[in-house]
Image: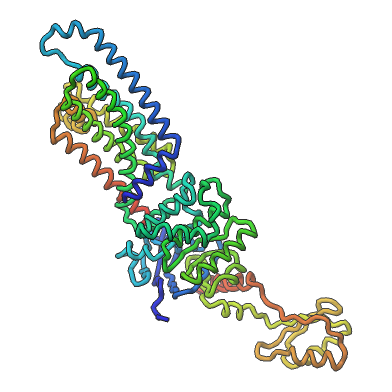
Amino acid sequence: MFTLARNELYRLFLSPLAWVILALCQLLIAYLFLTHIDYFMQIQGKMSAIPGAPGVTEMIAVPLMNNTAMILLLIAPLITMRLVAEERRNNSLPLLLSAPLSVVQIVLGKYLGTLSFFIVLLSLISLMPLSLSLGASLDYGVIMSGLLGLVLLVASFTAIGLFLSSLTAQPTIAAISTFAFLFLFWIIDWAGNTQIMAETTSLFNWLSLLRHYEPLLQGEVNSSDVAYYLIIIVAFLALTIRRLDAERLN
Amino acid sequence: MSLSPLLSATALSHHYGTQTQIAVNNINIEIYKGEVVGLLGPNGAGKSTSMKMLSGNLAPTQGQIMINGYDLLSQPKQAKAHIGYLPEQPPLYKELTVKEFLYFCAKINLIPSKNINFAVNTVLERCGLGDMTKRLIGNLSKGYQQRVGIAQAIIHTPAVVILDEPTSGLDPIQIREIRHLIRDIATEHSVILSTHILPEVQMLCDRVQIINDGKFIFSDTIAGLNKQRQAFNLLCTLLAPPSVTSLQKISGVTAVETLSPSQFCLHYQPDLNPTAELLNLAVTQNWQLTELMPEQHSLEDVFMNIIQQEQESATVEQII
């Protein structure tokens, strides 16, 4: 299983895609980081007069992590699309299926490999807010809970992407459907903004990926939010396993 | 030698989709140690489906597969450790180098880490890939990619190696090299290979199973297949030929066909071979014999015969 995960990660870094994504992500987020700092510098004087005003963490780190989540939503489908779809296209799936590995091991191996790529990406990004500690005092609790939120978020993106990739032999279709799916679950709580459908909207609110991320960004770690992400991850991994098993049966 | 087969499949069937689309219907395969079995059949006969089932890539609708004493369906991990499988298109990661790829294969086939180096080097040497270790698989020619595919299938020294059309799409020299390699593999492993190239079967296999429309219609050793090829015809060229009637008088000859003024084809009864008498007469009566050849059906003829017989009997059954 870990062999598979390592192989997955290694092959990812052999392709230019991984490097381009890492570089461009870094560039985008660095730019956002600088604009946040700039803004903070402008209003710093006024803010210091107000007691209990938001500090560096709330003004820079939190919005930055919010932006990161949005960017991850855009790039996660690009990374996950190739997981199963490309193997199917290259006819390399039999290699794994005829090896003494269970489908569970194959799916988990691929999942962990891809997830570790995102962890690398996140750790690079998290260096930016952490670098502020050179000149300011940070609220590490809030940053850590925000990072936990990001990890959970990207872990569920990967699980969803892996499942959609296992449905098709076309990486592009996998990417587009993953993006559509993620985006829908991102904005599904917008229906909740109207007061008319209070009953149904609570369900939509609960389903929204974003709604469970926001408390974590504020430094609030609710077990219900963490559980929501874990349920998403386990459910989609199970669906992927079922899907690959069904293929063997028919 | 133990009598239990290394791989045995009983009453194997597979339906694609609905019940009406039967790809493989009730086939039995047994492979003993050190044997090369050829699975022969026209395109779409069910060769690849059978291979996929034997390698655990496809679950059979019915039937049982035992590999080295393990049931492929209930103990897939143990059973799969004993098979190496090369599908029609070799499953390769084109962005890896040959060596990286084979290391990965060694690891997923659960070779203990202290033996991996040895296993990879052995297999590189056996498959003639020694000079290619650092090349990217995607840049190799089709023949070398095929070799990497075979290397991948035998790296964990499985009991049974399953090769699906191992020589398709290669040039004649590469075909010869791959055949050589397969013969070499057969000294240590049992091999099942599928093909639609008939001479290949004759060259490589100990036993043949001919499959058509998802059913086995012929299953015998190569010697048995060769027996089928015997046509009971003699082709002879006589520069001073006698009359046709005198040829017909030779005991055993049932008919004489005149191909040209000096060329004749003698049909004879299976149990009475007239060669000796013909030779005798030719010498004593000075017929000036310059050519004498027992005619053989080509493998193609035999193959076509078997398949046609099968189709005829099927239509008869339908009429009845």
x, y (%) of residue B81? 37, 63
The image quadrant that residue B259 belongs to is bottom right
The figure's colour scheme reads rainbow
Q: Nearer the viewer, residue A15 or A91?
A: A15
x, y (%) of residue B302? 62, 73
In the image, residue B228 sits, relative to residue B81, either above or below, namely below
**Is residue B23 visible in the rendered structure shown here?**
no
Instruction: Indicate left or right for A50 with B125 as reference.
Output: left
Q: Residue furthest left?
A: A51
Q: Nearer the viewer, residue B183 or B31?
A: B183
x, y (%) of residue B176? 62, 63
Q: Nearer the viewer, residue B12 or B144?
A: B144
Task: Name the residue at 33% across, 43% down.
Answer: A113
Give the mark count.
0
Q: Nearer the viewer, residue B149 or B261?
A: B149
Q: Quadrant of the N terminus of chain B?
A: bottom left
In the image, residue B24 sits, relative to residue A204, either above or below, namely below
**Is residue A225 visible in the rendered structure shown here?**
yes
Task: Name the residue at 70% across, 89% down.
Answer: B273
x, y (%) of residue B144? 56, 54
Instruction: Indicate left or right for B259 with B160 as reference.
Output: right
Task: Name the residue at 55% across, 70% down.
Answer: B311
Instruction: Indicate left or right for B84 with B146 as reference.
Output: left
Task: Name the residue at 20% across, 6% down.
Answer: A45
Instruction: Indicate left or right for A167 with A60 as reference.
Output: right
